[in-house]
Image: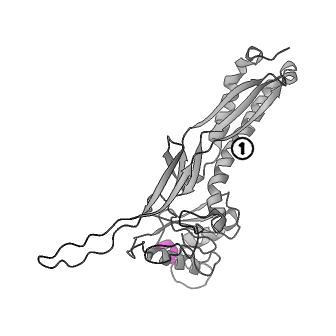
Amino acid sequence: MVMTRALHPADLWPGIKAHFGKAYKSMPTQHTRYFEDKSSDKAYEEFVESTTFGLPDIKGEGQAIRFDTDSEGYKTRLTNVVWGLGWMASREEIEDNQYESRASRRSRNLASSMGQSKEIVHAAHFNNGFSTSYAGGDGAALFSTAHPTLAGNKANKPTVAADLSEAALEDNRISIRLMTNSRGLKMYFRAKELIVPPQLEFTAERLLKSEKQPGTANNDINANKSVSMSGGYSVWDYLTDAKAWFLMVDNVPEGFVTLQRRKLEMDQDNDWATSRAGSIGARAGAFRASKAHPPLTTTDGALG
């Protein structure tokens, strides 16, 4: 007997989709705190760094103005890809009235897989950020002491790694404030948020919320609390290094970007060759996460 769509328990399909949608929406979404969502309608999108302008000169009477060039810097291409996963119900499951209960469970599990895959893909930019195997458009790792610019190499991590502490946090916040662009001009950056893995949550809580200087009997104020960061701190469950910590920076145009070409969708089909019905598939509309121009970030004492 050939399986056809007519044999598929279509009356159960709305409920299955509802289970999937409810489970997907109930999953904690963390990456959207760090990545800017952008829509895409092409196979790929390109982001180009601007080198900006240098300082002006004094123009003497009757003299010509010197013209500068706002050159193109490093280019980053983001190619959209489709992420998909599915499950199948056998003919026997349907005949034995097992389809409804198993389909509901599998749909919830599929939603969990799709949701977590999105977090893992985005967190990979942080987790692999020190490896040149995942270099950006300038050929350097995301977190590097040697990002090449017209004004020489720039760093967005310290030369010597440091565990999260009061001194390390203060040093990195100062370094961020002193950062300059490709022409050596100030960028007016401020650290806005500390990002930590679960292992550092309680350390971050003490550093940012203690009234007095943490870990001492001194009566000094806690400067990291009084000179606060607008975003405080957040815990990203998908960070894989127990000692890694990062500082996100404000006023960074097109820092971390995620593209979405199509929204998540769920559909059904039949497999006549193996007499299986209800092959349920989820496609996470083509999305791609990347750093277009690295915002200054920090881990293990890297700059944010």
Nearer to us in this view, 80 or 18: 80
Q: Which percent across, then down, holds residue 178? A: 44, 77
Residue drawn at the location 54% of the way across and 43% of the way down: 43
Magenta segment: 221-229
In which image quadrant can residue 212 be found?
bottom right
Q: Is residue 260 above or below residue 205?
A: above
Q: Is residue 136 above or below residue 104?
A: below
Residue drawn at the location 21% of the way across and 79% of the way down: 58
**Which residue in the rendered view is the most extreme toward the left?**
62
* Side (left or right) of 120 relative to 182: right
Nearer to us in this view, 241 or 206: 241
Residue 195 seen in the figure: yes
Q: Is residue 228 magenta?
A: yes
Nearer to us in this view, 154 or 169: 154
Query: Mark 1, residues whose alpha carbon is within 10 Å: few (<14), some, or many (≥20)?
Result: some
Which quadrant would the C terminus be assigned to in this image?
A: bottom right
Give the residue at mark 1.
Answer: 113
* Side (left or right) of 259 relative to 112: left
* Side (left or right) of 123 relative to 89: left
Residue drawn at the location 85% of the way across and 24% of the way down: 93
Residue drawn at the location 62% of the way across and 69% of the way down: 245
Residue 236 seen in the figure: no
